[in-house]
Image (tube, grey):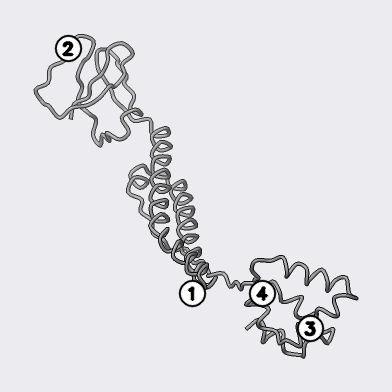
Amino acid sequence: MTLLIIDSGNQITGYTQDDYLQAWEGVRLAPAPDGFNPALLAHYMVKVSKGKTTITLNTDSALAAAKAARCSQIKEEAARLIAATDWKKQRANERDAAGWGSLADIDAVLAERESIRRSSDAAELAVNALTDINAVQAFTWSVDAAVPVPNRLTRGQFLDRFTKEERAAILAAAEANASLKDWVMRLENSDWIKPIEATPGLQALEIAGLIQPGRAAAILA
């Protein structure tokens, strides 16, 4: 491989595989150094001393550029993987809106997409920790981040886990208990509930005698 070097400034302007190419005014030719990487062309430096041309790679800037390029590729790869799940998300949303699905269907897709994001974030961190240009350029990654599927219930699904008598007792008690009334109001204004986050409130209901002992665990099951 032959490099094309502009005489003024000793700047590499390109390269060629044509062994018969002749130099022309303002441009001279020089053989590429061993291990020449075309992708890092801008990071090769030309030095002329006593008529001899020496071409070396600025490893610091080349490594930084290789990392930036690979991280950009990882972002694009992750974006394509996420886009490939758009139909799943749309289907889950439409099924839920029609009453055929549930938040669990939506959450499964969201967890899949979040796994892609976390895996790509980890991949970028791994790339930036590398110190070898070839290792950076050869780096591959996979979607392997473990993301638990959120456990969410709609407000209606959550309330259905109480008996009619329990709901009536809670509403009646809330009229005289500011803390309980606040809990009920927050529940009424929530689109969905994470059972694990409702644990303290349910345990308080048991202590207050508004639901029987053991009912909190049963409701959260």
The residue pinned by badge 4 equals 196
Instruction: Write down the residue under mark 3.
Output: 168
Q: Is residue 208 left or right of residue 82?
A: right
Q: Position of residue 156 (x, y in %)?
A: 64, 75
First along the sequence among labels 2 and 3? 2
Residue with the mark numbered 1 = 100
Q: Earlier in the sequence, mark 4 or mark 1?
A: 1
Q: Position of residue 56 (x, y in %)?
A: 32, 28
Task: Identify the mark nearer the N-term, 1 or 2.
Answer: 2
Question: Could you give the CA–CA distance between mark 2 and mark 3, rounded to whole angstroms?
Answer: 93 Å
Quarter of the image for residue 192 reads bottom right
- Name the mark nearer the viewer: 4 or 1: 1
Residue at x 81% of width, y 84% of height? 169
Q: Quadrant of residue 8?
A: top left
Q: Which mark is residue 24?
A: 2
Q: Earlier in the sequence, mark 3 or mark 1?
A: 1
Q: Position of residue 164 (x, y in %)?
A: 73, 86
Instruction: Tell me which amino acid carries mark 3.
Output: Ala
**Residue 33 occupies which quadrant of the picture?**
top left
The answer for how far apart the CA atoms under marks 1 and 2 are is 73 Å
The residues tagged by marks 4 and 3 sit, at their Cα atoms, a distance apart of 23 Å
| Amino acid marked by disc 4 | Ile
| Residue type at numbered disc 1 | Trp
Could you say which is closer to the camera, residue 140 or residue 219? 219
Q: Nearer the viewer, residue 72 or 33?
A: 72
Q: Image quadrant for the C terminus?
A: bottom right
Q: CA distance from mark 3 to mark 1?
A: 29 Å
Residue sitting farthest toward the front: 98
Foreground mark, 1 or 2, reads: 1
Quadrant (top left, top right, bottom left, bottom right) of the N terminus:
top left
